[in-house]
Image (tube, grey):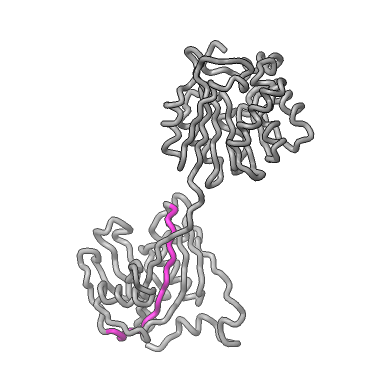
Amino acid sequence: MTTNHPTATDWDAEAAAFDDEPDHGLRDPEVRAAWAARLADWLPAGPSRVLDLGCGTGSLALLAAEQGHRVTAVDLAPAMVERARAKLAGTGAEVLLGDAARPPVGEERFDVVLVRHVVWTLPDPATTLRAWAALLRPGGRLVLVEGVWGSAGIPAARLTALLAPLADRVHSERLSGDPRLWGRPVDDERYAVVATLAPARRHTEVVDVHLILRRGDEVLLARRANTGYADGLLHAPSGHVEDGEDVREAVIREAREEIGVELRPDEVRTALVMQHRGPGGGARTGWFFEALHPAGGEPSNREPDKCSQLDWFPLDALPDDMVAYCRAGLDAYRAGDRFVLHRHEAGDPVAHRPGGPGRAVVLPETATARPAGQTTSSRSVNLPA
């Protein structure tokens, strides 16, 4: 090729003679065996989903399919795709027409993205490598065969540097010194890079606690200030569980620190549990506890640097200027719900949005969760003053 960015028309023109190159057609048994051995080292030992991008006439895709992998192959040139489909017929492989930089595979996830002699043609390899990494499952791998041929190509050092921020491990191996792969000795730079993404990590999230302090039909709320999060909005007294605490200990500590109320363990009752995801995607699980005023004493603002207002509000007419997470929790409490999911969508505000889409999903309780004939609402909300 005479350009660094070959087009579909260029590759269509190459298709008829493409397999004449020993490392393209793999017609020589020794060349084919050499590539099969390398591929077996680069791909997972067990059956996996392999996406071959810029597959050409499908020679490597065929080797992968023969080794028991489920293969999807993509090429930009219709003539290449036609030959790849013929070569892969009967293997169960799927061959798609499309741009390797933007493969038409939707949101599918693969164990391996296999690419040979494509990265050097890309106008923005860093962006494309990130897109390819996003097609992989956790622990998946990019297998990239590249080189430098005269003034064309991409050096191994540059490619490994581009992959470093994306991968947990990057391994490269020189291929120039193995003439069996090329059907002849070569003196230019040819190599393979296997970049393995980090495996799936165990899910972790913040646990926080919220105090629903009741005074008859009213609930105590505090207006946040100078915290950097949801300032100006109302929220129940709350905070994170600290190391070594259980959730009841945490809500008792937060009540003491924020509003000067000294609750005993027997004065707090579990109201509901809510798993929440913020607009930015961060997850947390909130435990909401109920206590009745004047248990623990008269509340006062003990953190004026973080709270600009402390007041009682009607539980059945809550103000609109609240943190959406807390408002959803109190609405669920009023309804007598015990277990709730609350998951913001991208672009949702942190603040409660009157008339906006509801994000709370109530999880059903078991049939034995409460005595026959008793509703959750009568249990939780209609309490004596």
Q: Residue at x 34, y 68 (%)?
A: 243
Instruction: Say which quarter of the image contains residue 349.
Output: bottom left
Secondary structure mainly formed by the magenta segment: strand
The foreground one among 158 and 181 is 181
The answer to whether any part of residue 330 appears in the image is: yes
The answer to whether any part of residue 12 appears in the image is: no
Identify whether 13 is placed above or below 282.
above
Residue 161, image x, y percentages: 41, 31
| Magenta-span inclusion, residue 15 | no
Query: For this view, does 323 lie left or right of residue 112?
Result: left
Q: Residue at x 39, y 74 (%)?
A: 247
Identify whether 184 is placed above or below 261.
above
| Magenta-span inclusion, residue 294 | yes
The range drawn in magenta is: 281-296
The foreground one among 360 and 184 is 184
Query: For this view, does 172 lie left or right of residue 217?
Result: right
Instruction: Say which quarter of the image contains residue 251.
Output: bottom left
Q: Residue at x 67, y 35 (%)?
A: 64
Query: For this view, does 50 lie left or right of residue 275?
Result: right
Residue 360, image x, y percentages: 50, 64
Considering every residue shown, the one lying at the far right of the view is 90
Residue 88, image x, y percentages: 74, 31
